[in-house]
Every structure is written in structure tokens, then in C-alpha cells.
């Protein structure tokens, strides 16, 4: 159960969790290709653009593991949601990964796997986060369906809770209070760190008997 000499494609080059998975997998001896929309990516891909997914698959060739962390948010009261934003959210989390499965199926080496990213919002819905709940919930079922259809390629999902990945930095001065409140509610008494998610990701990638599973890395937040 090792990632040594395995080839990983990680999508979400500007995600803090993606960068931590890339660093930890590289330290474990894997070859990592980090793909995304930003100029810092090793390879360019837009999960809303099937042609770019097809081109990425041709460029990458064969691989061992594919990790998809794309997320685009359409938050706000359901009465005010913009349809295009809702579509972008489903493109990043649900339709994009389905297109990844379409174009990468058949490219996995023996023992290969796919790892999708869900999120605690599906299990703890709150007003204004309906799209986040729906996309993350869909990911958990997508992992089960793909685990059956792509077998023996394994397919799993990780559902993070609140993680200090950089994505919350936009809260500014309110971030500390939000983290303190979240930590107080979580059974672990903490918010998550990118290394917490990365260690679960590496386990899901390397363990040959884990498939069709959503691994909750949420400090128990979905139960609180
Ligand atoms: N951090 C948390 O508290 C938390 C909680 C629950 C779930 N999660 C999930 O964990 C994953 C990683 O989260 P994170 O906090 O590290 O960072 P994040 O900011 O949520 O990362 C999202 C990434 O998705 C990319 N993306 C969005 N739309 C895309 C598209 N159409 N094509 C390609 N890439 C696209 C973004 O790229 P650009 O930079 O190009 O926009 C960004 O790199 C996400 O799936 C997120 O939903 C995180």
C-alpha cells in the first residue's frame, strides 16, 4: 500500500487541499501532475469544458490515480440563485468528474483509482447552501455508481468538514470567530488542516480494498 512510483493527476491546482495532497504524494514517491485553470498548473483543464478534459486525458496518457477537487460555489437564498452559477457549481463537482470518468476510463494501470471531493454541507444543510449540499451529495452517489461501472478501478470520495485550506481567508477578521465557533461544535474540538485531508486521501488512493466509499474527514461535524 504505497504511492511510490505511482502517477497521480490532481485537478484543482489553486486549492490548498490539492497542493497538500500533491506535496505529500510527492514525498511518498509519487509522480504528480497538478492540473487546473491557473497559470501555475502543470497542465490546463477546465472541468466545464469537455474538450479540455479530452485534451488532458490525451496528454496524461496512462496513470494510476486521479484526484478531482474542483469546486465552484453558488451560495445564497434559493430565491436569488443565478442559473449560470448553479450550472458552474454542478460542472465543477459533478458533470466535470463524470466527463473525467468518460475520458480517463481505460487509462488506469492495475490498482488504479479515482478520488472525488464531496463536503460536509451535504450532511448538514443550512439555508443559503442548497447548491453546495446538492453537489456534494451527488458526489457521494457518483462515487458509488462509478465504483461499480469503472471496476476494477476503485472510486472513492472524501467529504471534508471545515478545513483551513485558504478558502476561508476571504472572511478576513471574521475567520477566527468562525473557526472558533466551528471547532466548539465539532466533536473533535478542532477545525481541519490540509494535512488531515491529505492523509485520508493517500489512504483512499493506496488501499486496494476501499472502493465506493465516502470518507468523512470532518471532525464529526456532520453529526454535531
Ligand atoms: N476547505 C473546506 O473547508 C472544504 C469543506 C468542504 C469541502 N471542501 C472541498 O474540498 C475541495 C478542495 O477545497 P479547498 O478548500 O482546498 O479549495 P477550493 O478553493 O474549494 O478549491 C476549488 C478548486 O476548484 C477549482 N475549480 C473550480 N471550478 C473549476 C473548473 N471549472 N475547472 C477546473 N477547476 C475548477 C478552483 O480553481 P480556480 O482557482 O481556477 O478557480 C480551485 O482550485 C473542494 O472540492 C471543496 O468543495 C473543502
Image (spheres, rainbow, N blue to C red):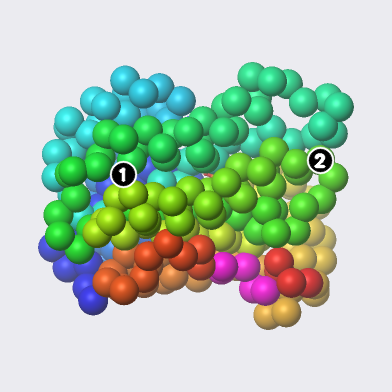
Q: Secondary structure at mark 1?
A: strand
Q: Secondary structure at mark 2?
A: loop
Residue plotted at (31% across, 20% down): 51
- Circle 2 residue: 128
Q: Is residue 132 above or below residue 54?
A: below
Task: Provide residue 75's location: percent of width, then percent of height.
Answer: 74, 36
Location of residue 82 (image quadrant): top right
Residue plotted at (15% across, 60% down): 110
Q: Is residue 116 above or below residue 209?
A: above
Front-most of residues 39 and 52:
52
Front-most of residues 209 and 22:
209
* In the displayed structure image, the side of residue 125 where residue 41 appears, left or right: left
Residue closest to the far bottom: 188
State which region is magenta. Answer: 216-220
Task: Provide residue 190's location: percent of width, then percent of height.
Answer: 68, 74
Task: Provide residue 40's location: percent of width, then percent of height.
Answer: 35, 35
* Quadrant the C terminus occupies: bottom right
- Circle 1 residue: 34
Residue closest to the far front: 148
* Quadrant the N terminus occupies: bottom left
Amino acid at each position: 500500500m504505497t504511492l511510490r512510483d505511482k502517477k497521480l493527476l490532481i485537478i484543482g491546482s489553486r486549492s490548498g487541499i490539492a497542493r497538500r495532497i500533491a506535496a505529500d504524494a510527492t514525498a511518498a514517491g509519487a509522480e504528480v501532475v497538478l492540473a487546473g485553470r491557473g497559470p501555475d498548473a502543470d497542465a490546463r483543464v477546465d472541468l466545464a469544458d469537455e474538450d479540455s478534459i479530452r485534451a488532458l486525458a490525451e496528454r496524461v496518457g496512462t496513470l494510476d490515480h486521479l484526484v478531482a477537487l474542483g469546486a465552484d460555489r453558488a451560495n445564497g437564498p434559493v430565491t436569488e440563485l443565478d442559473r449560470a452559477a448553479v450550472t458552474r457549481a454542478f460542472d465543477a463537482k459533478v458533470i466535470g468528474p463524470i466527463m473525467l470518468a468518460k475520458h480517463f476510463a481505460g487509462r488506469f494501470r492495475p490498482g488504479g483509482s479515482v478520488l472525488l471531493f464531496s463536503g460536509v454541507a451535504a450532511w448538514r444543510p443550512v439555508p443559503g447552501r442548497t447548491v453546495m449540499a446538492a453537489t456534494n451529495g451527488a458526489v457521494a452517489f457518483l462515487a458509488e455508481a462509478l465504483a461499480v461501472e469503472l471496476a476494477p478501478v476503485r472510486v472513492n470520495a472524501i467529504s471534508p468538514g471545515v478545513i483551513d485550506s485558504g478558502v476561508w481567508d476571504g472572511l478576513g477578521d471574521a475567520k477566527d470567530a468562525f473557526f472558533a465557533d466551528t471547532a466548539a461544535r465539532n466533536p473533535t474540538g478542532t477545525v481541519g488542516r490540509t494535512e488531515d485531508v491529505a492523509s485520508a486521501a493517500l489512504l483512499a488512493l493506496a488501499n486496494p480494498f476501499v472502493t465506493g466509499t465516502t470518507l468523512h474527514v470532518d471532525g464529526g461535524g456532520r453529526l454535531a
